[in-house]
Image (cartoon, rainbow, N blue to C red):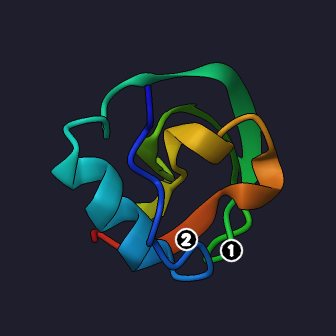
Amino acid sequence: MSCGCGGVNKNDGKNVVDLVRSKGKGDFPLRTPHDIECVNCENTFTMTTHVDECPTCNMVYGVTPCSSHDKNNILAAGVNY
């Protein structure tokens, strides 16, 4: 079964978040939660879903299900995106 990640610009956080949300997987839990240092406020938080946000500044992060195993694939999309 394909996760639908083909064709997404994996270097663009907004593109990734839009794709994951369009597939209805934004709130799906990550198999492996990742500790993220926020690029906006430098707070560290644990990302637990495919689309999540920093609890301090609301910077939104996203990762496709296909690439969620590697924390380096998580991208920032924007504050309150």
Give me the residue at 68% from left, 74% from top: 39
Residue 23 shown left or right of residue 31 in the figure: left
Sequence-first tag of 2 and 1:
1
Looking at the rendered image, the quarter that the C terminus falls into is bottom left
Give the x, y percent position of residue 18.
28, 65
Can you tell which mark lies on residue 57? none
Give me the residue at 49% from left, 55% from top: 62
Q: Nearer the viewer, mark 2 or mark 1?
A: 2
Give me the residue at 74% from left, 66% from top: 42
Question: How many numbered marks, from 0 up?
Answer: 2
Callout 1 amino acid: Val
> Which residue is label 1 attached to?
39
Give the x, y percent position of residue 29.
46, 20
Callout 2 amino acid: Ala
> Which residue is label 2 attached to?
76
Question: 36 above or below 11?
Answer: above
